[in-house]
Amino acid sequence: MTKNSFSLLLAMLISFPASAAWTLNSDESTLSFVSTKAINAAEVHIFRVLEGGVDDSGQARVSIDLTSVDSAIELRDERMREMLFETATYATATMSAQIDMAEVAELSPGESKSMTVMGELALHGEKVALTFDVVAARLAEGKLMVMSQKPVIIGAQQFRLTQGIEMLREVAGLPSISSAVPVSFVLSFDSQ
């Protein structure tokens, strides 16, 4: 192999997006959920600390620091950490999915594509298979964004969270808190 051929091959391997690993840019990413209390009072909450990435094979993994829950009310955050998420025992949740990196590699900067990906949520000691309808967008070379196309509905009973919801309802003196929770996300990844 000549020096020029080797240089060309090396340049192709370095620039090919599917061969790159991607790291979650937590400053540009959000994961939010909506709680509904007293039948029709809805509030948006977020998690402030997310970590993760996508490996060469397309295995995506996002770790959610449950202690970073932010409802804009510190007392409610504390109660959610202690009564609902039980962060002393279950400090993190993990969202994982398999991304088709060949589809991602086809995207040029500025292009996006709707995708359905199979995944799993590990939360509160339980693991549940989920389907995520997402939009993957190549913002620039080395910049990928994956957004929920529609919220993922998480059922509290699937993760043994109904007792925690009931405790929150009682301590707040509410007639009800919904056990079905819509979750949305915007995840920004940088290639390594």
Image (cartoon, helix red, strand yellow):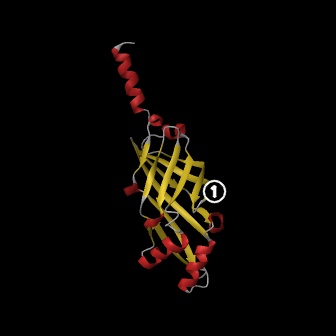
In this view, which residue lies farthest toward the bottom?
173
Can residue 73 be seen here? no
Q: Name the spot of residue 40 as percent of width and height, x first.
A: 58, 79
Can residue 13 be seen here? yes
Locate the C terminus and report the quarter of the image it occupies. top left
Determine whether 136 is above or below 162 in the image: above
Q: Which residue is disc 1 drawn over?
A: 128
Label 1 amino acid? Val
In this view, which residue lies farthest toward the top?
1
Q: Residue at x 53, y 69 (%)?
A: 86
In this view, which residue lies farthest toward the front?
89
Q: Name the spot of residue 87 as percent of width and height, x first.
A: 50, 66
In this view, which residue lies farthest toward the right?
157
Determine whether 22 is above or below 31 in the image: above
The residue nearer to you, when weighing 140 against 56, is 56
Indicate the quadrant where residue 142 lies. Answer: top left
Q: Residue at x 45, y 50 (%)?
A: 52
Q: Name the spot of residue 50 as percent of width and height, x first.
A: 44, 57
Q: Residue at x 56, y 41 (%)?
A: 100
The residue nearer to you, when weighing 66 against 186, is 66
Q: How many C-alpha atoms fall within 10 Å of the one at disc 1: few (<14), some, or many (≥20)?
A: few
Q: Name the spot of residue 112 as percent of width and height, x first.
A: 49, 47
